[in-house]
Image (cartoon, rainbow, N blue to C red):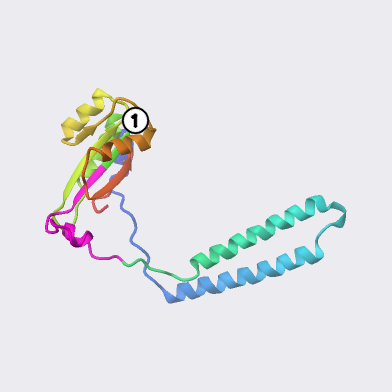
Amino acid sequence: MDDYFRRFEDRQPPAPIAYSPWREALWQMLAMATLVTGLWYLHWRWTQSLNPEALWFALPLVLAETLAFIGLVLFVINLWQDQPVEIKPAPARYGDVAPGVPDAARPITVDIFLATYSEDPELVRLGIVDAKAVTYPYPIDIRIHVLDDGRRPAMRAVCAEEGVNYITRATNEGFKAGNLRNAIEQTSGDFLVICDADTRLFPTS
């Protein structure tokens, strides 16, 4: 299992594509041509191509095509204009995200949850190692918690070896949601990062 993941250790997400007015104009032109062609096609379908001898089949078919075109219109509206995400500066202190609090000058605390049930403990270890490597522009308190709903000694041992917190419970009430709720009641981070057992965080996550 470790050998399988090792092949992908050096992968990094590609950088966001920079905004281009020419690319946006080309997309809008092609989208309008598609919509005009679609409208022409639907007009022809409704007015000239319906088979009066088999309306039981023709009407549902043309209705499905019409609904598909409506979906295309909504798709074009949603992507009509490029809306680049404004990346705000990372908060440095608790007061930056919760103005007016008494302890505004303290560092931010982040709880990273790795929820697991029956996954191989060595697979979860890979996620733990990556979570320990997460970086931030300012000093913050990152706490890693493994939420083991399988109550496995092997998983507890991995957590002890990696120096992270191990949380379990006596029952599996509520399944994963219950597992997360149980952990939230025992932790106090300002922010939560909830990961599946096989999640591999990037250092800049």
The quadrant where residue 82 appears: bottom left
The quadrant where residue 21 appears: bottom left
Q: Is residue 191 left or right of residue 74?
A: left
CA neighbours of label 1 inside 10 A, class few (<14), some (14 to 19), many (20+): many
Q: Residue at x 68, y 60 (%)?
A: 66
Q: Can residue 137 be seen in this snapshot?
A: no
**Amino acid at pointer 1:** Tyr
Q: 15 or 82, which lies in front?
A: 82
Secondary structure under the numbered disc 1 in the rendered image: loop
Q: Residue at x 32, y 67 (%)?
A: 86
The quadrant where residue 167 appears: top left
Residue 34 covered by magenta stretch:
no
State the image coordinates of residue 156 (x, y, percent, origin top left).
22, 28
Q: Residue at x 16, y 31 (%)?
A: 161
Is the stretch drawn in magenta largely helix, strand or loop?
Answer: loop
The answer to whether 52 is drawn above or below residue 176 in the figure is: below
State the image coordinates of residue 110 (x, y, percent, origin top left).
21, 48
Q: Is residue 178 left or right of residue 61?
A: left
* Direction top: furthest residue: 153
State the image coordinates of residue 65 (x, y, percent, origin top left).
68, 58
Quarter of the image with the N terminus is top left
Residue 110 covered by magenta stretch:
yes
Q: Residue at x 33, y 61 (%)?
A: 15
- Which residue has dot 1 on it? 117
The answer to whether 24 is drawn above or below residue 201 in the figure is: below
Q: Is residue 34 left or right of residue 177?
A: right
State the image coordinates of residue 81 (x, y, percent, origin top left).
47, 71
Q: 16 or 167, which lies in front?
A: 167
Q: How many marks?
A: 1
Give the residues drawn in magenta, as a range: 87-112
